[in-house]
Amino acid sequence: MEPEELKEYLDFKADQYENPNFIESDPIQLVHQFNNREDMEIIGFLVSTIAWGNRKMIIRSGEKLIDIMGSSPHDFIMNYKEKTQPAFVHRTFNSNDLDFYFRALHAIYQNGTLEKAFAVHPEIEGIKGRIVNFRNEFIRTDHLPRSEKHLSNPIKNSASKRLNMFLRWMVRSPKKGVDLGIWKEIDPSELYIPLDVHTSTTARKLGLLTRKQDNWKALEEIMDTLKRFNPDDPAKYDFALFGVGAFEEDL
């Protein structure tokens, strides 16, 4: 496709998939169960952390997390005592990891907010720097070395799919009934799409991506075009690339 045709196609597909029906099979449905800002961001962060594998399995594991924390995840975090949580396993994310995440969230909320933990980095620009800043803040809490693998690091060329997805949930406008738009200190223009097998496969078929590995450099290659197509809200095209890759057999 020519660039104008590609933009028109992606705009059409983004509008097609960004609607409340999308929530029915997506882990973001769990976040929509809550109304309190802190509850929503805590559930969103934890569910996005375990968002790999079959989406039905992700949702089931997310429901277990909600069972553990009850109707007020924020209250649970603020009153959390080390190693008091029930057993939890989602693939390689286990009870030790969950204990670390609960304690790290407790420390972040004692000192401020989760949103402020994604502050602008003094040396690294854009959303990459914000993720690095957050990661550095998060791992200040004592933890087993193995737990760090669940917190992606774009400095090491990780595409940081799950953190980018979480940020999309928190930052993008709620007008179409999917994302939440509860964070105002990060502009939607900064967001990157969460790069997974569906989005990268579609991106390669459409000529948006030539790199073979799904890493941060590949993500930047895709975002170079998406930012030109919509500089104010480039992450909206996540719905197009993911929707086509996940729900359509032929491109």
Image (spheres, grey):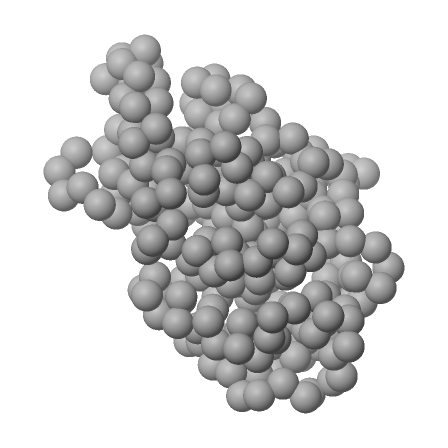
Q: Is residue 132 left or right of residue 123?
A: left
Q: Is residue 161 left or right of residue 109?
A: left
Q: In percent of the image, x 38 and y 36: which residue is there? A: 18
At 61% from the left and 75% from the top, the residue drawn is: 69
Which of 241 and 69 lies nearest the eye of the viewer? 69
Which residue occupies the foreground of this view, 134 or 174? 174
Residue farthest toward the right in the current orientation of the protein: 111
Q: Which one is nearer the viewer's eye here, 223 or 212?
A: 223
Q: In the visual, does 208 lie left or right of 236?
A: left
Picture coordinates of residue 223, whole percent (x, y): 47, 30
User: Percent x, y for residue 140?
Assistant: 79, 66
Tell me where residue 27 appears, x and y as whole percent: 42, 58
The answer to whether any part of residue 235 appears in the image is yes
Residue 76, image quadrant: bottom right
Rendered position, 4 above or below 190: above
Vertical placement of 47 versus 240: above or below?
A: below
**Which residue is farthest left?**
250
> Residue at position x 31%, y 17% from top?
8
**Quadrant of the frame with the C terminus:** top left
Residue plotted at (78% across, 61% down): 108
Quarter assignment of residue 226? top left
**Location of residue 38 in the rendering, given as x and y in whole percent from the top left corner:** 69, 57
